[in-house]
């Protein structure tokens, strides 16, 4: 029920020692508090004056104040620790996401990753703060209270020992039930977060197609599933709280009854009996607090597990083998790939199978095939987002590297996906994605080359208009032009990766965008993945993929003359040739 990875955090050993020390001191404060309160009450019962109890009440208040001062100190220390760990964990998570690239976000879901980095980290901080303090109190305080109780009354001590395991057993049983409900709640929460982001992205399209009202039923269904899962988790949490409160109250009542009977029979003095009665709730209190806060921190525990699962994903090593001058792509640069095999999952078939490629200098390489043929996988591998299996041979300018996840190689790449991400920022800063230091004049020129001039003139604040999430929404063609403008703005990067950049555009918009893209392709190494055949007329070399294999390769004219897989693909995708 406790994730052991929590104790692997840096500084955990030191914080646990400090918490143990605070709990140890608090336990003695509780004993002193009960002792001097019982002495004062017993003195008054025996007819002593109120003045005679001043010193005892003073010690009681000092113990009471000391106990709560230690609580305040512990909370302050844990808040600082959880804040530091949350900040470190968020940085590690974001570094991992950026290292693994878009495939991780696609697999986990954009909404899930975003909520994990924001809400999930906050829940993790709450989990650390509450869980550590309550766990340490439960491990230390009851046993010191129990030891002092045995010194006062063996019978009461035995009663406490007998009842304690029963309460722990119920806590474990109900804890597993609560964990099951919380797991289901967190799973529906991930679905809801991904669904929410997807709905926002497609809201404009749904409205234009007149499907917004019918889609609202789907939104309601997903929200209702999350509501039911949340209510299920709450019901178990309330039930467990009631059960533990009932058993601890019953246990205290049993101790009180036995103490009362022995007092009536004259078998026990008032002072030890009253002290034990005051200590009995304190004995069970850490267990009750741990149980209550355990249910409150299940979301944090699940968030931590999800975060650590991503952090456990291996990132490529040996990323500095290619120097900056060797990674720089020029007219004389040369690349050789042999025996390239890529697999998405450990037991899945290869997504790319025995890829061979040799290329020198600038040029435009078209990658075409049916859906699922491996086009995007090829682009992602070339960009270093996916790692090849062992046995691959990659030679870049005479340097053998194990993969393309070389830092200097990736600094030479501009990546234009199907749906470029637009940040909540100005249009100018979105264009500055690769070159944040670019001047306003350079941004304006890049925007004009990308065909954004007329669009910018229509904006109320021009290039300073806020776009992206919660800002002005751009159409698919406009978003792609922003991505193209990013490439125009950075002439130093000579490797362009296009992953079906026009897949979601109508043919008219694509033709307009094509006019902006073509001038960009000169004097670059271009890998252009698409299922639109008319782009192949612009390519210097074409790779035809089928189930991860290169089944045909050559220029457009050579492939037509060969009348092989390329010709067959053209016949299968005749709708694309119509627009060529």
Image (cartoon, rainbow, N blue to C red):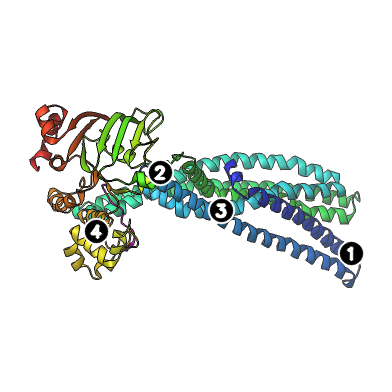
**Element type at marker 2?**
helix
Tell me if mark 4 has few (under 14), some (14-19) or many (20+) residues whose alpha carbon lies within 10 angstroms of its own: few
Could you give the CA–CA distance between mark 2 and mark 3, rounded to whole angstroms? Answer: 22 Å
Q: Position of residue 41 (x, y in %)?
A: 84, 63
Could you give the CA–CA distance between mark 3 and mark 1, rounded to whole angstroms? Answer: 50 Å
Mark 4 vs mark 1: which is more N-terminal?
Answer: 1
Q: Main secondary structure of the magenta part?
A: loop
Q: For the point 15% across and 35% down, which residue is it?
A: 555
Could you give the CA–CA distance between mark 2 and mark 1, rounded to whole angstroms? Answer: 71 Å
Residue toward you, 539 or 82: 539
**Element type at marker 4?**
loop
The reply to whether residue 499 is in sight is no
Q: Which mark is residue 100?
A: 2
**Element type at marker 3?**
helix
Q: Please tell me whether residue 420 belongs to the stretch shown in magenta.
A: yes
Residue toward you, 49 or 287: 287
Question: What segment is highlighted magenta in the picture?
Answer: 416-426
Mark 3 vs mark 4: which is more N-terminal?
Answer: 3
Q: Which mark is residue 474?
A: 4
Could you give the CA–CA distance between mark 3 and mark 4, rounded to whole angstroms? Answer: 38 Å
Q: Which residue does the numbered mark 3 point to in the structure image?
A: 85
Q: Circles 3 and 1: CB distance less than 8 Å?
A: no
Mark 3 vs mark 1: which is more N-terminal?
Answer: 1
Mark 2 vs mark 3: which is more N-terminal?
Answer: 3
Q: Quadrant of residue 475?
A: bottom left
Foreground mark, 2 or 1, reads 2
Q: Which residue does the numbered mark 1 point to in the structure image?
A: 43
């Amino acid at each position: 029920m406790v994730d052991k990875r929590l104790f692997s955090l840096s500084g955990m050993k030191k914080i646990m020692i400090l918490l143990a020390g605070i709990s140890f001191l608090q336990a003695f404060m509780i004993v002193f508090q009960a002792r001097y309160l019982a002495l004062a009450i017993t003195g008054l019962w025996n007819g002593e004056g109120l003045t005679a109890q001043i010193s005892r009440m003073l010690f009681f208040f000092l113990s009471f104040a000391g106990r709560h001062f230690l609580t305040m100190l512990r909370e302050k220390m844990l808040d600082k620790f959880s804040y530091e760990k949350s900040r470190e964990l968020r940085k590690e998570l974001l570094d991992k996401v950026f290292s693994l690239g878009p495939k991780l976000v696609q697999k986990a879901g954009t909404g899930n990753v975003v909520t994990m980095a924001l809400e999930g980290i906050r829940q993790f901080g709450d989990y650390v703060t509450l869980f550590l303090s309550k766990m340490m109190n439960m491990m230390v305080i009851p046993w010191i209270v129990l030891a002092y109780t045995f010194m006062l009354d063996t019978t009461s001590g035995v009663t406490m020992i007998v009842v304690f395991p029963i309460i722990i057993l119920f806590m474990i049983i109900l804890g597993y039930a609560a964990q099951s409900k919380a797991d289901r709640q967190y799973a529906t929460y991930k679905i809801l977060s991904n669904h929410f982001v997807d709905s926002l992205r497609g809201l404009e399209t749904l409205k234009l197609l007149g499907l917004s009202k019918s889609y609202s039923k789907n939104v309601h269904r997903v929200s209702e599933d999350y509501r039911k899962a949340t209510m299920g988790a709450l019901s178990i949490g309330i039930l467990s709280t009631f059960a533990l409160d009932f058993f601890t109250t019953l246990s205290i009542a049993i101790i009180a009854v036995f103490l009362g009977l022995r007092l009536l029979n004259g078998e026990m003095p008032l002072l030890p009996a009253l002290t034990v009665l005051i200590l009995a709730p304190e004995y069970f209190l850490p267990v009750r607090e741990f149980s209550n806060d355990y249910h409150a921190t299940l979301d944090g525990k699940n968030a931590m597990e999800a975060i650590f699962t991503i952090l456990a994903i291996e990132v490529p090593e040996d990323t500095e083998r290619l120097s900056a001058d060797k990674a720089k792509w020029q007219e004389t640069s040369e690349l050789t790939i042999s025996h390239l095999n890529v697999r998405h999952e450990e037991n899945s078939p290869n997504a790319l199978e025995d890829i061979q490629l040799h290329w020198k200098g600038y040029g435009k390489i078209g990658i075409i095939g049916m859906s699922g043929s491996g086009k995007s996988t090829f682009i992602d591998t070339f960009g270093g987002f996916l790692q090849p299996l062992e046995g691959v041979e990659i030679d870049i300018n005479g340097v053998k590297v194990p993969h393309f996840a070389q830092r200097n190689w990736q600094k030479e790449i501009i990546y234009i996906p199907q749906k470029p991400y637009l940040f909540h920022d100005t249009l100018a800063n979105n264009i500055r994605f690769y070159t944040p230091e670019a001047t306003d004049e350079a941004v304006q020129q890049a925007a004009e080359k990308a065909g954004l001039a007329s669009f910018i003139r229509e904006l109320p604040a021009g290039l300073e208009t806020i776009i992206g999430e919660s800002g002005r929404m751009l159409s698919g063609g406009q978003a792609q032009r922003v991505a193209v403008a990013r490439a125009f703005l950075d002439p130093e990067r000579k490797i362009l990766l296009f992953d079906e950049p026009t897949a979601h555009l109508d043919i008219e918009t694509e033709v307009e965008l094509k006019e902006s893209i073509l001038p960009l392709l000169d004097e670059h190494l271009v890998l252009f993945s698409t299922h639109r055949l008319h782009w192949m007329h612009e390519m210097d070399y074409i790779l035809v993929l089928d189930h991860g294999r290169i089944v045909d390769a050559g220029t457009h004219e050579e492939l037509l003359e060969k009348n092989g897989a390329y010709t067959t693909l053209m016949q299968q995708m005749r709708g694309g040739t119509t627009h060529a």
